Amino acid sequence: MYLSEAEEWFAIFICICIVIGFTLSTIQNIRDTISEEKEKEKQKQEEEEKIKELIKYMDTKSDLIDTVIAAQEKLKRKKESMDKKKSKN
């Protein structure tokens, strides 16, 4: 099967259009993938910040609870010592 010169040029033009279309589609897919990865990284950073904040909150709360327990124990010892002094008198 022989093609005329115009048909050959048309076939070459179609092939070039297909290659350009494929290239542009690939470039768009790469850009979309990069954009998605950047969004995932941003979300990961935000989640890490939230986790750090929660850890800091839990540490502060733990310190507060420890302080309250120490104060309660100190009051209990003080009360016991006062009770002993009262019983001696």
Image (cartoon, rainbow, N blue to C red):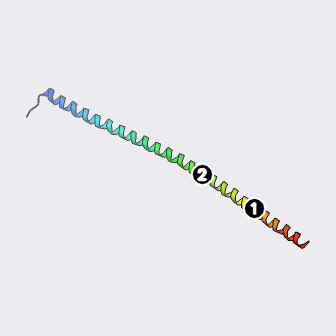
Q: Residue at x 70, y 56 (%)?
A: 64
Foreground disc of the pair 2, 1: 1
What residue did someone put label 2 on? Answer: 54
- In the image, 53 versus 72, the foreground residue is 72
- Which residue is farthest right? 89
From the viewer's perspective, is 12 left or right of 83? Answer: left
Check disc 2: other Cα within 10 Å, few if <14, some if 14-19, many if 20+: few
Residue 3's label in the rendered image is none
Going by the image, does 88 lie left or right of 59? Answer: right
Question: Front-most of 57 and 74?
Answer: 74
- Mark 1 residue type: Gln
- Residue type, label 2: Leu
Label 1 residue SS: helix
Residue 69 percent across, percent down from the top left: 72, 61
Q: Tell me the quadrant of the picture where the N terminus can be found.
A: top left
19 relative to 57, above or below: above
Determine whether the residue tagged by mark 2 lies in a helix, strand or loop. helix
Quarter of the view holding residue 70:
bottom right
Residue 18, horizontal then vertical, whole percent: 25, 35
The residue lying furthest to the left in this view is: 1
Residue 50 vs residue 21, the one in the foreground: 50
Specify the quadrant that holds the C terminus.
bottom right
Whether 82 is drawn above or below 68: the answer is below
Distance from Cα at disc 2 to Cα at disc 1: 27 Å
Residue 7 location (% of width, % of height): 14, 28
Left or right of 34 on screen, residue 58: right
Which residue is pictured at 78% across the width and 65% down the height? 76
Residue beneath disc 1: 72
Q: Earlier in the sequence, mark 2 or mark 1?
A: 2
Side of 77 where 57 appears, left or right:
left
Q: Position of residue 20 (x, y in %)?
A: 29, 34
Which is more toward the observer, 11 or 55?
Answer: 55
